[in-house]
Amino acid sequence: MKNKKPEIDSLIECTNPDIIIGTETWLDPSISSAEYFNSNTYTVYRKDRPPNQKGQSHGGVLIAIKNDYQSIECKELQTNCENVWVELTLFNSRKLIIGSFYRLRPDDNTSLGHLNESFAVSTKILSQFYLLVVTSTLEILTGIRLAPFLENQT
């Protein structure tokens, strides 16, 4: 993501997503989310990977939610892996939990164990909510439009 700003701008302009979920952001604390997402349009939740010995930041996850929606970070669901969780209140007052999770390698069972911890906590305290998780070993930037899902909801 760090090296693909024009592509991200084009994706946002063409699709106008309500939610953006990303992995492999390569962002670090010195890079403002506003460099990629208009802060008047999106609230961005990130978990950056600490820089390596060469000072480079790889990995990292994010969720960007349009400011039209009420959202809050779910810190109680975060564990010791690359994940970020957000509770989104939809127009019909239903709750949606969105997670962005990065699994470093296919054989990385430690990260899967941490993800399972997040699921366990979510079912204890948020059992009435929906849950959506994105997992990937590749760079993912997904845009979601909520309108089709909300049209027939009561």
Image: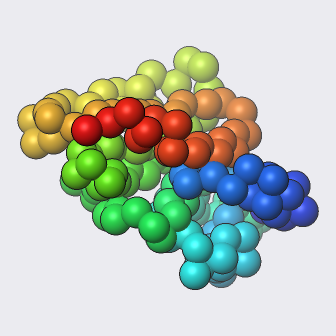
In the picture, measured across the screen, residue 122 lies left or right of residue 13, that is: left
Q: Which of the two residues, 129 or 111, is positioned nearer the viewer here? A: 129
Quadrant in which the C terminus appears? top left
> Image height check: is 146 above or below 58?
above
In the picture, measured across the screen, residue 84 lies left or right of residue 42, that is: left
* Residue furthest to the top: 107
> Image height check: is 12 above or below 120?
below
Q: At 52% across and 25% down in the image, what residue appears?
A: 108
In the picture, measured across the screen, residue 139 lies left or right of residue 100, that is: right
Measuring from the top left, give residue 71's x and y in whole percent. 35, 62
Measuring from the top left, give residue 110's x and y in whole percent. 41, 29
In the picture, measured across the screen, residue 149 lies left or right of residue 38, that is: left
Q: At 34% across and 65% down in the image, what residue appears?
A: 70
Measuring from the top left, give residue 4's x and y in whole percent. 86, 57
Residue 121 in sight here: no
Q: At 54% across and 52% down in the image, what residue appears?
A: 19
> Image height check: is 96 above or below 61?
above
* Residue furthest to the left: 124
**Count of numbered badges drawn on the protein:** 0
Q: At 14% across and 33% down in the image, what residue appears?
A: 127
Q: Which of the two residues, 64 or 58, is positioned nearer the viewer here? A: 64
Quadrant in which the N terminus appears? bottom right
